[in-house]
Amino acid sequence: MNLAAAFKSGKGSQLLAGVSFWYIVAVPSLLFLTNIGEKAYQDAFFLVLLVYALFRGRADWSAPVLLIWSTWLAYLGWWALTDSLGRGAIDLDPFRTGLLMLLLPWLVGWARDKNFRRPLRIGFRAALVVAMGVALVQVLVFGAPRATGSENALVFATLISMYGLFTVYQEFCREKGKGAPLLWMLLTLMPVVLSGSRVAIVALLVIFLLMLFRFRRVVNYRVLAAGSVGAVVFALLLAGGELSSRISDAVESVPTSGEELQSFSNDFIQMDFVREAQPTESPRLKPEYATSLGYRLVYWRTGWEVFRANPLLGVGSTEEMREVGRVLDMGTYFHETHSHVHNTFLENLVTGGLPKLALLLAVLALPIIFLRPGPAGREPILFITIGLVLFGMTNIVLELTVVTFIYTLVIAYFLAAGRPRGREDGEQEYPHSDLLRGDS
């Protein structure tokens, strides 16, 4: 059978979905065990989808999809503009970060086909198994203290959390009265625990507790109790030392006495983060701020000052850490240490001003606004958005290529499955047979 006949018969949709399937499954191992980088993987898969969109694509141009898509284009466009102004040269890298989002109308159109949706569901589950294997190999075989990625552990934890939020919610909808959702919940938590990311662990636990409350009438509490015991044992055996160390570091860096609290408050308000140095020494942070929490406090306080000085256009992604260093008269110290201010909302303010943050919030809010209530629409996107907001409190999120790629696939899936509001009379809806039987 030739390629044209394959697409005409419907098998082409399976081939197309296979592109996204292999990307989802490959990322936990390829991204975190090689040095090629996530953008190279995205580019290869994007080209395949783009060629199909140009010649065989069936786009959805309904008002909700068009508005969400155009808001994303505005966000990426403003991001590219402010980065270009900050850099003093044309910088289109933001469009590469959100590359798959450029095909959103076609992805929504393809997601009407069960041959496209089913591999995505399987792919997310397979990726959780792969992620667990990668994390165990890193910790047990290579002796790494944390399961981490080419950039950092929080990126790995955020990605796996998105896989898990999608899968666990789907399992709750499909497996009422059974223990499968709880088992997938544990399979999500384990590699995240091995990452040692304190924020991701806490955020994921909060969201899973919300899910358990949402589905409290169908939760198998025996499986929940057994799984909880197993998870605690697993954490103590494989990640107990690292977690204990990171929790101790966080506790020790928090002021406890009234005198320490007053001193910390004065330092924070006055931005007194730099220790006194000899004329021959390079400026350095005070020891109490040279920690994971300390760096974030420094970045949040100085980043706010950078935004106040550049409220409309920001300073661009390439210049933000230089500006943070200038605020504290530390030169390129921060530019050489980190690449962002460790808060996705402040990051958007610093790099692109108020318009960029407003566009980001619109990007996150529009799918929730337009999707209809229910398990195939607004509800799962709401849980995933809560996750992104929580993860974004201490790190960047949609500025990461791999996270935006996966988020785009999830948005397309539910825009097709959730029958967005705003369709005109007579316009086609998406009567998915798998959704009608609860297999969303």
Image: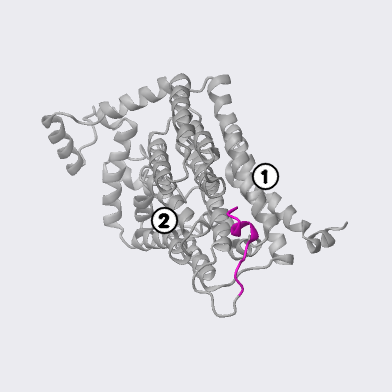
Quadrant of the image occupied by residue 289? top left
Q: Provide the major secondary structure of the magenta segment.
A: loop
Q: Which residues are magenta?
A: 428-440
Name the residue located 33 percent from the left edge and 63 percent from the top edge: 312
Residue 353 image position (x, y, % from top left): 35, 59
Quadrant of the image occupied by residue 204? top left
Residue 267 image position (x, y, % from top left): 18, 38
Is residue 315 visible from the viewing direction of this image?
no
Quadrant of the image occupied by residue 142? top right
Which residue is denoted by mark 2 in the rendering? Answer: 86
Residue 284 drawn in magenta: no
271 up-or-down from 62: above or below: above
Mark 1, Cα crowd under 10 Å, few <14 / some 14-19 / many 20+, is: some
Q: CA distance from mark 2 to mark 1?
A: 37 Å
Is residue 218 visible from the viewing direction of this image?
yes
Q: Which mark is residue 22?
A: 1
Which quarter of the rendered picture does the N terminus lie within?
Answer: bottom right
Residue 365 as seen in the image, left or right of residue 120: left
